[in-house]
Image (tube, rainbow, N blue to C red):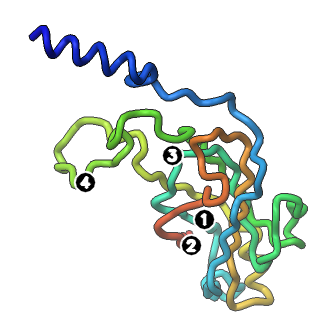
Amino acid sequence: MAKAAKKRASVARRSPKAGAPKRVGLPTQPTVTADTYTSKPVAIDFADASHRLTSADLEILGLFHGEASYEGRIFFNNSKADANTPLTIDNGYAGSFHVFGHGGCFGDVGHCDISGHRDPFDLRRSHPLTPITKRIDVTDALKTYARSNRHVTITVVPVVSVTNDQCDDKKVFRFDQMRFLSYNP
């Protein structure tokens, strides 16, 4: 027992930061521009005047939110959109969403790993980093573009508001699936 205590003490002397919590600097403005995402052309014939479309949402499923906080600006048919593009329908602007990021992982190895399958009757809350879903009302822009287009490309421009050294400032927008939801009377 005494040998084990001596060994722990000598290890602690050799590495004074062993067991110390991770330290992160103050939140800062990003120094790089985040990567934008542009989809392949998506059919929008469900939104033309011959249909009874009353409203439409763009749904983004499996959205990662473990790092930086950002605003996701959505543009139709404007793959060159960036953080400085005016937010008007003429420039393809369709709407935006916000992600309040967790700022990176500060725990031990495996702390931020999302566990696999959960029993459907498990009443505990899901893991805090479980991917989220966002729905954005894009009705006006979709109806406008459906008048003269049969397809649109969807560009998402992430505008990072705050970050730290635990965050990847380039690959901010990560998701599993994106789809339109249309509502008819």
Mark toward the viewer: 1 or 4 = 4
What is the number of the mark on residue 66?
A: 3
Mark 1 or 4 closer to N-term? Answer: 1
Whether residue 185 appears in this view of the structure is: no
Q: CA distance from mark 2 to mark 4?
A: 28 Å
Indicate the amino acid at tag 3: Gly
The residue type indicated by label 4 comes to Gly
Cα separation between marks 1 and 2: 6 Å
Q: Earlier in the sequence, mark 1 or mark 3?
A: 1
Q: Position of residue 75 (x, y in %)?
A: 75, 69
Eyeballing the image, is 163 above or below 12?
A: below
Which of these two is toward me, 22 or 56? Answer: 22
| Mark sitting earlier along the chain (4/3) | 3
Q: Is residue 85 left or right of residue 180?
A: right
Q: Residue at x 40, y 33 (%)?
A: 107
Left or right: 7 as drawn, with respect to 169: left
Contact? badges 1 and 2 (CB < 8 Å): yes
* Disc 1 residue type (three-letter): Asp
Q: In this figure, which residue is indicated by the disc labeled 4?
A: 116
Nearer to the camera, 70 or 77: 70
Q: Which residue is mark 1?
A: 57
According to the image, label 2 marks what residue? 180
Instruction: Look at the picture and state if 70 lies above or below 43.
Output: above
Residue drawn at 63 percent across, 79 percent down? 39
Circles 1 and 4: CB atoms closer than 8 Å = no
Q: Position of residue 126 (x, y in %)?
A: 33, 42
Between discs 1 and 2, the one toward the N terminus: 1
**Amino acid type shown at disc 2:** Phe
